[in-house]
Image (cartoon, helix red, strand yellow):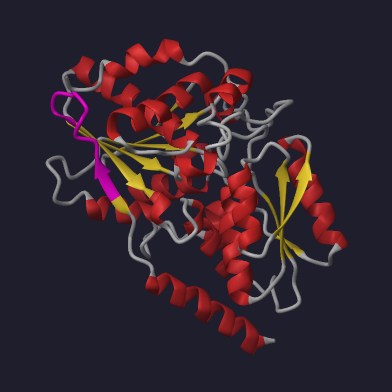
Amino acid sequence: MANWVSQAIKKINADYQRSADTHLIKLDALKLNGIDIYLKDESTHPTGSLKHRLARSLFLYALCNGKINQHTTVVEASSGSTAVSEAYFARMIGVPFIAIMPRSTALKKIALIEQFGGRCHFVDCPTQMHDEAIRVATQSNGYFMDQFMFAERATDWRGNNNIAESIFHQMEAEPHPLPHTIVMSAGTGGTSATIGRYIRFKGMASKLVVVDPEFSVFYDSYKQRDSSLTAKRGSRIEGIGRPKVEASFQGDVIDDMIQVPDAASVATMHWLNDTMGIKAGPSTGTNLWGALAVAKTMLEKGEQGSIVTLMCDSGERYLDTYYNREWIDREIGNTCGYEEILNAFVTD
């Protein structure tokens, strides 16, 4: 048993050694006097999203805590990207994987999970995922990975090439090397917790602003200081926002939050594709809208500096949903009102 666990950890670490860091893209087309915005492109991971980092950390955390052996079925509650990445690592170490996900999940993500050998188990609403994951794990004598519980503790926030350390290292040669603000959306809350803790650990002046979509309770919870809030439905921006305040969400390390309309998120992802040729997912639209809102406030105050936000995954996963106009009109509504606002940020 101990030898199997040791070999599983070695396989995961070897995969990490084979992986290069993700790119930091400067958005040069933006018309912002003295303010630079950067996208940390997490879509270049082997499994195509920011969640590759999380899945690696969760598997190492579970293995080192004695939760997974060669006979364990790993179960996760995920709307897609985390499940894709966990299916990849489960296949790597040779254990079965079951993803509990909403029926509305993008078809491309479902196909990727199955491509990596995982099995998809569907529920009608995101609010049902957690309880169903517990039931399936119990029934299969498996282990519920529970990203929403363990994300903030599985990652070493002090460094060890986490995403925060990577961002600050890549910014060192830029005109404004210390970011004025880092903008991040929250799914589990693990990445924002890592970034916020790292900023404080290093004694930096950078601010952390977390953006939140509609139908998510993170924003209201942060503003009201009430972690008991719940919602009756899930977020429409796949991969971020939650109907309850998850254990990994650490509001005390956040400097401010911005609530972003879902139509603005979708409009921004299309605008990014149309103006700069970067095809990103909907959470990137949420992130970039928040970054532009921070830039607007900085301009009004006469401030200069850099803003870093994340491209969480590629838009190729959403061709049947967020890049489908009929789907957008039906599920999100009219996005045209935000286009004029966005076009004001682009150089002529």
Q: Position of residue 68 (x, y in %)?
A: 69, 72
| Quadrant location of the C terminus in the rendered image | top left
Q: Position of residue 24 (x, y in %)?
A: 28, 48
Q: Position of residue 294 (x, y in %)?
A: 31, 25
Q: Residue at x 70, y 77 (%)?
A: 69
**Front-most of residues 71 and 273:** 273
**Is residue 26 on the magenta stretch?**
yes
Is residue 105 depicted above or below 336 in this figure? below
Is residue 302 depicted above or below 65 in this figure? above
Say which quarter of the image contains residue 75.
Answer: bottom right
Q: Residue furthest bottom?
A: 3
Q: Main secondary structure of the magenta part?
A: loop
Q: Residue at x 71, y 27 (%)?
A: 233
Q: Is residue 104 toward the left or the right of residue 298 in the image?
A: right
Q: Residue at x 80, y 46 (%)?
A: 131
Q: Is residue 5 visible?
A: yes
**Is residue 170 on the magenta stretch?**
no
Say which quarter of the image contains residue 83.
Answer: bottom right
**Front-most of residues 155 and 56:** 56
Q: Is residue 203 visible?
A: no
Is residue 250 depicted above or below 164 in this figure? above
**Front-most of residues 167 and 105:** 105
Q: Is residue 305 toward the left or the right of residue 47 in the image?
A: left
Q: Position of residue 163 (x, y in %)?
A: 38, 54
Q: Residue furthest right?
A: 139
| Quadrant location of the N terminus in the rendered image | bottom right
Is residue 188 depicted above or below 226 in this figure? below
- The magenta segment: 24-35
